[in-house]
């Protein structure tokens, strides 16, 4: 099993700051968003990781490059502990990079990983979504895949009034096994037309067969629109090759400013070094 992180997007919701700082590098206290995905992969047994970037994103490569001189610059214990944790991750992972030179959609970004993935199955992660789970979400998907030998989508139940913001799946549930067979997907449907209230979240386990699907779709593509992974998933659902796994945990939406603020607050309150003072500060703000 391999891991692919799609980090080539423009980050338009966070402009103008994303002109110079990729949203994948936004801090959650002292660690960037993307590091938590690398950690999720490693804790799920995935050590070979490809990060798809684009121009303006070299800072991501720099972050995952060990710099002994820089790492030894400080003597502060808390900072040293954070640096050592990052270096421990790097020592466990084989992280490589490729660049998406033209922004032609998420399917193209996935296709760029074909030589890295080869014939393996792999998990695609979008940095817009982080998950707080007792068992890492990628491991949950691997378990579902090992039982079914099918492509697996991570699913999150959302309020009906929010379905028009996300990709919503249509499914059939096997009452004996509990398996959710995904039969279709609709991008941002109207509330009255939504087939369910299960959104497709930011983790996808694909078999290598998806590369042939994307290649076939690209031959029919009119180049006026982006070629998205949703189109490829629809082909696979038509062939009864996709199941859904409802996430056992909490999703954090870091793809928009308010969601990022909420996520930062949650991580700060989960950090024993800052929790007490930060909570006191928040309470003071609320009661002004």
Image: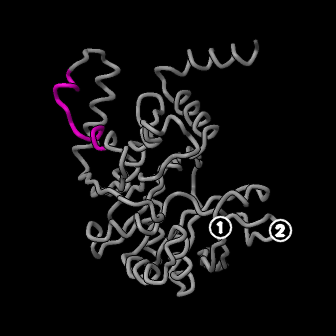
Q: Is 89 inside the magenta-drawn segment?
A: no
At 49% from the left and 73% from the top, the residue drawn is 223
Q: Mark 2: few, some, or many residues within 10 Å (few <14, many ≥20)?
A: few
User: Is the Cβ of the residue at disc 1 closer than 8 Å to that at disc 2?
Assistant: no
At 46% from the left and 39% from the top, the residue drawn is 19
From the viewer's perspective, is residue 218 above or below residue 57? below
Q: Using the rendered view, name the quadrant where residue 265 is placed.
A: top right
In the picture of the structure, the residue carrying the numbered disc 1 is 187
What range is drawn magenta here?
A: 61-72
x and y percentages locating residue 36 in the rendered image: 42, 43
Q: Mark 1: few, some, or many residues within 10 Å (few <14, many ≥20)?
A: some
Q: Using the rendered view, name the quadrant where residue 88 is placed.
A: top left
Frontmost residue, 140 versus 222? 222
Residue 192's label in the rendered image is 2
At 45% from the left and 69% from the top, the residue drawn is 107
x and y percentages locating residue 146 in the rendered image: 42, 73
Outermost residue toward the bottom in this view: 239
Residue 129's label in the rendered image is none
Quadrant where the C terminus is found in the figure: top right
x and y percentages locating residue 249 in the rendered image: 57, 51
Q: Is residue 42 left or right of residue 192?
A: left
Q: Is residue 5 left or right of residue 197?
A: left
x and y percentages locating residue 77 in the rendered image: 30, 18
At 39% from the left and 55% from the top, the residue drawn is 5
Q: Secondary structure at mark 2?
A: helix
Q: Secondary structure at mark 1?
A: strand
Frontmost residue, 134 versus 52? 52
């Amino acid at each position: 099993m391999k891991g692919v992180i799609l980090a080539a997007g423009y980050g338009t919701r966070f402009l103008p700051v994303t002109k110079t700082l990729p949203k994948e590098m936004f801090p959650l206290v002292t660690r960037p968003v993307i590091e938590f995905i690398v950690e999720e992969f490693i804790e799920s047994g995935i050590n070979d990781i490809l990060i798809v970037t684009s121009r303006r994103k070299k800072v991501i490569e720099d972050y995952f490059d060990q710099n002994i001189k820089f790492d030894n610059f400080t003597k502060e214990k808390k900072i040293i502990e954070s640096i050592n944790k990052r270096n421990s991750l790097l020592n466990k992972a084989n992280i490589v990079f490729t660049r998406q030179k033209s922004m032609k959609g998420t399917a193209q970004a996935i296709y760029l990983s074909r030589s890295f993935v080869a014939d393996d199955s792999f998990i695609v992660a979008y940095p817009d979504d982080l998950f707080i789970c007792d068992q890492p979400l990628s491991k949950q998907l691997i378990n579902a895949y090992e039982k079914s030998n099918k492509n697996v989508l991570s699913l999150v139940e959302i309020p009906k009034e929010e379905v028009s913001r996300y990709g919503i799946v249509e499914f059939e549930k096997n009452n004996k096994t509990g398996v959710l067979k995904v039969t279709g997907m609709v991008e941002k449907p109207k509330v009255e037309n939504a087939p369910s209230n299960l959104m497709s979240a930011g983790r996808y386990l694909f078999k290598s067969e998806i590369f042939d699907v994307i290649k076939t779709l690209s031959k029919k593509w009119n180049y006026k629109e982006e070629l998205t992974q949703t189109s490829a998933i629809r082909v696979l659902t038509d062939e009864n090759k996709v199941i859904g796994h409802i996430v056992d945990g909490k999703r954090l939406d870091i793809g928009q400013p308010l969601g990022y603020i909420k996520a930062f607050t949650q991580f700060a309150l989960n950090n024993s070094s800052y929790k007490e003072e930060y909570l006191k500060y928040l309470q003071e703000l609320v009661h002004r």
